[in-house]
Image (cartoon, rainbow, N blue to C red):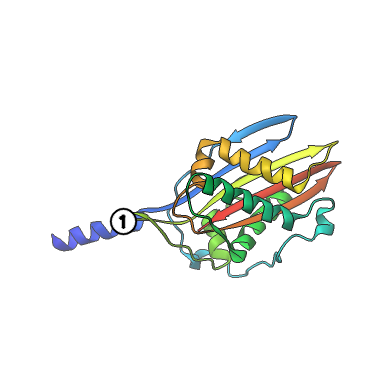
């Protein structure tokens, strides 16, 4: 009987693992849609992830992004996130270059495969990406609970006009803050680090900007 009780307790502890995710898509002045697609997932064993780690560099080359500087946009989004957290009396999150590479990888993947979601068309998930890059996250969220990471994503597309990095950063964080679930994710008090990854694609006279925010 005691063994059964201990086994049930072990199963309960292992099941209380959370991944918090959400995405916002913004098509500028033409149309707008908010997607609240938060869900909880059990963490996956990193051994199940692909063993080859892709190289996405430290940032997207500005020449490939043309007018916009992805590295500057990443820094500005990070600063804006911390301004929102401090305004709510929360601690700042540090910018983690390793986590930014994970985020940048997902933004690039969305841009190149033309989708906007936390899971790729091939089924790659947030936990897969953390495992792919060997990023180990473990944050206590309360009694007997912990998180293995979190994610917000944002997409905007515009043509016939141009926006500065500062304007896009403001729109990105405003979009997250105006969506209750994304705001909740951004303002979780237990986050200690974040990585911001931006990928910019110019296609058919339009600029497409993908932003991924990963937490630990």
Q: Is residue 114 visible?
A: no
Tag count in the figure?
Answer: 1
Q: Residue furthest left?
A: 1
What element does badge 1 sit on? Answer: loop
Specify the quadrant that holds the N terminus: bottom left
Q: Is residue 55 visible?
A: yes
Rendered location of residue 87, percent (x, y): 53, 45
Left or right, 163 with respect to 215, comes to right
Examine the rendered structure and indicate whether residue 27 appears above or below residue 18: above
Return the x and y of residue 210 as percentages of the image width and height: 69, 48
- Per the image, the residue denoted by label 1 is 144
Does 51 appear above or below 177?
A: below
When the figure is inspected, residue 143 is found, relative to residue 156, above or below; the finding is below
Asked where in the image residue 197 lies, by quadrant, the reply is: bottom right
208 left or right of 134? right
Residue located 49% across and 54% down the image = 91
On the image, which quarter does residue 140 sit in? bottom left
Residue at x-position 57% and y-position 39%: 177
163, 144: nearer the viewer: 163
Residue drawn at 72 percent across, 62 percent down:
59
Dot 1, how many residues are within 10 Å of its Cα: few (below 14), some (14-19), or many (20+)? few
Which one is in front, 45 or 155?
Answer: 155
Q: Residue at x 73, y 46 (%)?
A: 166
Tell which residue pokes out farthest to the top in this image: 30
Looking at this view, is 137 or 180 the one in front? 180
Q: Quadrant of residue 106?
A: bottom right
Residue 97 placed where, x, y %?
62, 65
Q: Where does residue 44 sit, x and y in percent of width and height? A: 46, 59
Task: Name the one closer to the observer, 189 or 197.
Answer: 189
């Amino acid at each position: 009987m005691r063994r059964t009780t201990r086994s049930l307790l072990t199963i309960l502890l292992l099941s209380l693992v959370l991944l918090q995710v959400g995405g916002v898509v913004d098509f500028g002045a033409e149309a707008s849609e908010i997607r609240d697609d938060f869900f909880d997932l059990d963490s996956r064993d990193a051994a199940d992830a692909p063993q080859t780690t892709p190289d996405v560099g430290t940032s997207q080359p500005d020449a490939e992004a043309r007018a916009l500087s992805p590295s500057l946009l990443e820094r500005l989004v990070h600063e804006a996130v911390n301004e929102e957290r401090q305004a709510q009396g929360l601690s700042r999150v540090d910018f983690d270059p390793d986590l930014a590479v994970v985020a940048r990888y997902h933004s690039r993947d969305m841009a190149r495969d033309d989708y906007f979601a936390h899971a790729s068309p091939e089924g790659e998930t947030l936990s897969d990406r953390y495992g792919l890059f060997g990023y180990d996250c473990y944050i206590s969220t309360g009694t007997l609970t912990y998180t293995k990471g979190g994610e917000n994503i944002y997409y905007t597309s515009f043509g016939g006009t141009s926006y500065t990095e500062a304007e896009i950063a403001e729109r990105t964080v405003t979009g997250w803050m105006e969506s209750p679930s994304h705001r909740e994710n951004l303002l979780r008090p237990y986050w200690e680090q974040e990585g911001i990854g931006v990928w910019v694609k110019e296609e058919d006279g339009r600029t497409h900007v993908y932003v991924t925010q990963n937490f630990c």
